[in-house]
Amino acid sequence: MRSLIYTFALLFIFSQNLFAGNGYEEAMKKGIEDLYQAKGPKAVNQSANYFERIATAEPEQWLPHYYAAYARINLAAMQQSDEQLDLAQKHLDQITSQDKDESELVALQGYLYMIRVSIDPATRGQELAPKATQTLSKAAQMNPKNPRPLVLLAQMEYGTAQFFQSDTGEACKKATQALVLFEHQKEVDGLQPAWGKGNAEALSAHCDKP
Amino acid sequence: MKTLLIFLISHTLLAAAVAQHKLHGSVKDPEGKPLVGANIFLEHTYDGASSDTLGGFSFATSAEGEQLLMVSAIGYEAFQKQIVVSAADQSFDIALRESTQAMEGVTITAGAFEAGDHKKSVTLTSMDIVTTAGALGDISGALQTLPGTQTVAEDGRLFVRGGEGYETQVFIDGMQAQTPFNASVPNLPTRGRFSPFLFKGTTFSTGGYSAEYGQALSSALILDTKDKPAQTQTDISLMTVGADVTHQHAWEKASVAVKGEYVNLLPYQFLVPQAMDMFKTPETAGGSVVLRKQTSKTGMVKAYVNYNMANLGIRQTNINHPDRKDSIRLSNDNLYANLSYREVIGKKWSVRGGLSYTYDEQNRSINHQNIREENQYWHAKTVFTYDLSAQAALRMGVENMYQQTGQQYQQEAASEIGKSGLQQNLSAAFVEGDLYLGHRFVIRPGLRYTYSALQQRGTVAPRYSMAYKTGKDSQLSLAYGQYFQQPLTQWLLLNPQLTSGRADHYILNYQYVKPGKTFRIEAYHKQYDQLIKYKLDADSKPINLSNAGKGYARGLEVFWRDRKSIPNGDYWISYSLLDTERDYQDYPQAAMPGFASRHNFSAVYKHFITSLRTQIGGTYQWASARPYDNPNQEGFMAGRTPAYHNLSLNAAFLYKQNIIFYTSVTNVLGTDNIFGYHYADHSDSQGNYARQAIAPPAPRFFFVGIFITLTKNQQANQLDQL
């Protein structure tokens, strides 16, 4: 009987742990899938709220904050909203976890600056555009295998080159490099950031047009 | 058996763990309108939902018992409620309160126009200041398109609400800038000494300003210099009137910027003939150094040194001697140094302060008469802020201003030199609190005490302002305050016992701000007292100086800006109605002064043409007639000038990412503006006083410039320096 209680207790603890662990991963996987599928501000906001809930429940994890911030930045781009960017910044500032991926976080910070500029380029371009470029370059330097800072840099450079009707070659080269990196991107546990391939493909398609 | 038992028990346990309870309800704003996209969830769980277009939500949870229901939405206070999750479905109707911390929170706006790049509800950005047509890159030029200012185009300084130019005080990082404008001769407009691209934020207050700012009767222009720049770059400007070069170097935690500039109107004078006979065309040369050092995460030290020298010489017809011309010469050396710091000390305290020094030497000569004036000013200040709670903050500070003036006067080259001088020390202390009463109401009581060592007298100036949020986008502000300012040095030299002038401000302001749109209307009354009054003796020298002068100014001002309705377009419109009279200086009776005009109107439009990579802009300014005293006419100050019109246009073309071409023309229509008249001291044989119009040296001003930025990656341009 004693062994039964032991087994029971062990099983209970085990199942609880298992439940919590799997719950987090499953919830994250589902959320990430939904976020990548999300079309339109309503769905993206739902995603952002979803990750905000997990972030509140799992203060030790950096990924819920990361995805909440990423969703808010996308939403900000759709709605031209500074408030959404402020929230995204709050999420980034709240990350305390030690096992965070610095290059990904710096890249996301650069993305945030990029969208901040796009909301009011005439006013903010002078100060924030170089800051965005610098932050993204820093992220690329921290991890040369990270395709996300590269594709964002390519997008910025392409837009600028188009505006000034100058050569888009450098931007396109970066997009191609990013695509190669995307091909070699390793899936660790399905939770690590993996977005951006679509952007690189779309940009390459533009570049290939005569 | 055992195994089965374990299996069964664990299974029921798991089943119990995933038993679902349903929560639903709605989220609304304080006015009962549905809030879309709010996040509703139970703390420490992943369970929750986003509200739909009707504010409704519904979600299932496996949590049981006591839980914390949380709701968050942008612009609203986070909501929390302790609930007990039980078997039955539960419904919650939640009303959120507007957040005081939100960007649109209640702030005191009476009298103040904020311009900056970082706050979202600003009226003008620093970019606007430099791209406004007609402003020619001058801060005060751009501010003259805002309500509360009067067009006094022959002067160039800021004349606010029936006040003279000297009644506007300029502060850089909280420190007084005693000589913010270039030295000039009468009727030749001056420009600000400080380049607009030094500053990240501008607060232009046309009245009712905080107890922190003293020695200003009418207006405070508060300029905050930029923090550390992001990158190393060199800017080169080539203009029809001169050139400048700036190099800034940025490190991780510090930066240094060095600028040199030279402006000479000589080549321009050949291209565009000037009505004024200039034997020494206006010329300025100068340089500045800016050091910025981040001393900690929250600490910053800035040092700024600016040196300017200016020279000019003109010949003006003297209406009293039509057969000859007066030759007027001016040379000026000016040094301004400013050291400021800020730091957060602990959770509740922060400190900022600084030291500024001004050295200004002016040599003026009119024919053979020479005047040399040397002024030195020191200003030291420290301000502490104490955050009592989220609802209350206290600011207190002390400052000291020291001035030393020496004047030498020589009637003719060989004659004896007359000397006079002055030393003045002003010590001041102030305390001010911000108190939030609920979510919609803020009051700011303040008190300022100033002691003058020269007159051995102190003044106590109470100031109050408050704001009440009348709706999500609108608010009402009220302000009252007493303002004191020392008499101008020229009067103190004649009588050091003259005391400060006084102005009492009463302001009522309503503001409506939506993203991209701003509407403001403001009514005010300003009562002047203790202004300088004197009589003129037979040689036109002031005698019997006293503080017996009085006056008032009252008016209504409207501002509307819309940068949203027209794609790529942006415009603002200002109107000011001014009713003012004063009985001061040598006025025989109260009258509307010569710098005032009853109506001032300005409209600014900017449009970016993406396909041409060009921004075009236009500014139209209109000011109604200004008074002047006509000895040929009955009554004092009964003459009226024609109305003032000025349509200015500009265009900026982004040739490359780092090269901009810029051109502007002021007064495109060539309107002959007249600012007033000089009358002869004595009448002619028919009993008529001859006169001479005060008019600009040329109807139009043309400007062409190329701005080049050199960086490592060629990303930046000088668009915000135009």
Image (cartoon, coloured by chain):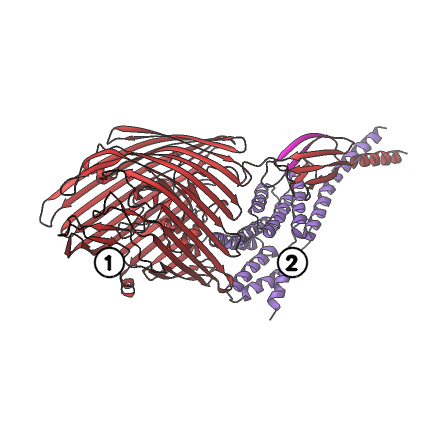
Q: Is residue A189 shown to the viewer in this render?
A: no
Relative image position of residue B97 (x, y in whole percent): 60, 35
Relative image position of residue B20 (x, y in whole percent): 78, 36
Residue B514 versus residue B648 in the image, above or below: above
Colour chain A is painted in? purple
Residue to which mark 1 is pinned: B276
Query: Looking at the rendering, in which quadrant would you find the N terminus of chain B?
Result: top right
Q: How crowded is mark 1: few (under 14 residues within 10 Å), some or many (20 or more)?
A: some
Locate residue A194 relative to residue B228 in the image: left or right. right
Relative image position of residue B391 (x, y in whole percent): 51, 31
The Cα atoms of the two marked residues, 1 and 2, are separated by 67 Å
> Image point 9% across, 47% down: which residue?
B415
Amino acid on which disc 1 is placed: Met
Residue to which mark 2 is pinned: A197
Relative image position of residue B526 (x, y in whole percent): 36, 36
Colour chain B is painted in? red
Q: What stretch is highlighted in magenta?
A: B68-88
Locate residue B152 relative to residue B535 in the image: left or right. right
Residue B612 versus residue B29 in the image, above or below: below
Outermost residue, bottom side: A210
Query: Looking at the rendering, in which quadrant would you find the C terminus of chain B?
Result: bottom left
- Residue toward you, B292 or A83: A83
